[in-house]
Structures are given as C-alpha cells and as structure tokens.
Image: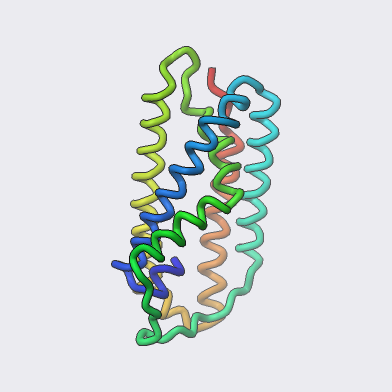
Amino acid sequence: MSNGLNYGFKRGYLGAVGLVLGLWAVFLVVVVGLGVIIQASPIAFNVLKWAGVAYLFYLGLAQWLSKGSPITLREGDKPKIGIFEIIGKGISLNLINPKGYIFMLAVIPQFIVAGHSLAPQYVAVALTFAFTDLVVMAGYTGLASRVALRLKTEKQVGVLNKVFGSLFMLAAVVLATFQQAG
C-alpha cells in the first residue's frame, strides 16, 4: 500500500513484483531446510503453526487498536524511485520479514502429500502463492494510489485499521484450522 501511495499504481506495483521474488526466496529457504523438519515432526509443525497463529492475531489486534493518523501526502509529492530500487525494496522486505517464514512454515506442509514427488507440489504451491499475492497486491496498490489520499480524518483511518486488523485476525483463525498433511 505504501508503494501505491508514494509512487502511484504503475511504479508501486513493481514493489509487488519484488515482494513475490522475495516470497519465492523465502519459500525456497523453507522447503529446502525447515520444511522437511516440519513435515517429519508433528510437534515442530504445531509449535510453528501456533506461533504463526499468535503472531497474525497479534498483528491484527495491534492494527485494530491503532488509531492511525490521516495521510497528509499531497498528490504532487510523490518521490521518484528507480525500477530496480523499488523491486529490490520488495525483495528485501520479504527476505527480512519473519512473519513470511513463520507463515510458510505453518502453511506449506498442509499442501504437500507425503509419498508423492515433492518438486511438482512445491512448484504448484509457489506459483499459487505468487499469483494470489500479485492479485491481492494489485488491489492494495490500486486502493492506496486512488483512495488513501482521501483518508482525511482519524476516524476514516481508524475504520480502515479495523478492517485490515479484522482480516489479519481472520487469517489467524483460518491458519489455526490447518492440520499437518499425511
């Protein structure tokens, strides 16, 4: 959303491309290393799953309780940023964000069928994550580039915070229902 707000939709969406590239790097780290351990150990899976649930719920509750402040950036204030810089920022953001690793560790094993070839399953999950993220990020970027500048009051920003906080908490509840495959 901040990319859409700061750079407009076209340039801001390049940040989403960077986020997906970073997501794939996180995915690779998880499936090559820790994902194997999680699949072999129900205890490790459950520890990570519940850590992910708690973290997502915490993020949602913090967002829900946040009052927020009106956005004061004017339309003409959009800074300039290079294509590779914005993509690099997206990659870096996902690489250093622990919630991505926690989420992947908790979710990926749900979609892996033991005894079947892993490579095609991993490719299908990675492509599904990428597609979903690109679609969702298009919505966020578009929303931010068109609507966010109209959030002039603390009350309007507070409502938006409650909506997104609720979505995070809903994601935590959905994640809590996941069971280890196989």
Q: Which colour assignment does the render follow? A: rainbow
On the image, the x and y values in percent for residue 30 come to 54, 35
Q: In which quarter of the image is the C terminus?
A: top right
Decide if residue 42 is on the left or right side of residue 113. Answer: right
Of residues 12 and 159, which is closer to you in this image?
Answer: 12
Position of 18 relative to 119 (above/below)? below
On the image, the x and y values in percent for residue 110 come to 51, 28
Of residues 79 and 84, which is closer to you in this image?
Answer: 84
Position of 141 relative to 157 (above/below)? above
Picture quarter containing residue 24?
top left
On the image, the x and y values in percent for residue 42 come to 66, 23
Position of 141 relative to 19 (above/below)? below
Pick out the residue farthest to the left. 10
How many numbered circles are shown? 0
Q: Which residue is found at the position 59% from the left and 74% from the top? A: 68
Of residues 28 and 123, which is closer to you in this image?
Answer: 28
On the image, the x and y values in percent for residue 14 come to 34, 61
Decide if residue 95 is on the left or right side of residue 45. Answer: left
Q: Which residue is found at the position 57% from the left and 25% from the top? A: 36
Q: Which residue is found at the position 50% from the left and 16% from the top? A: 114
Of residues 139 and 98, which is closer to you in this image?
Answer: 98
Q: Which residue is found at the position 43% from the left and 21% from the top? A: 118
Pick out the residue farthest to the top. 115
Q: In which quarter of the image is the N terminus?
A: bottom left
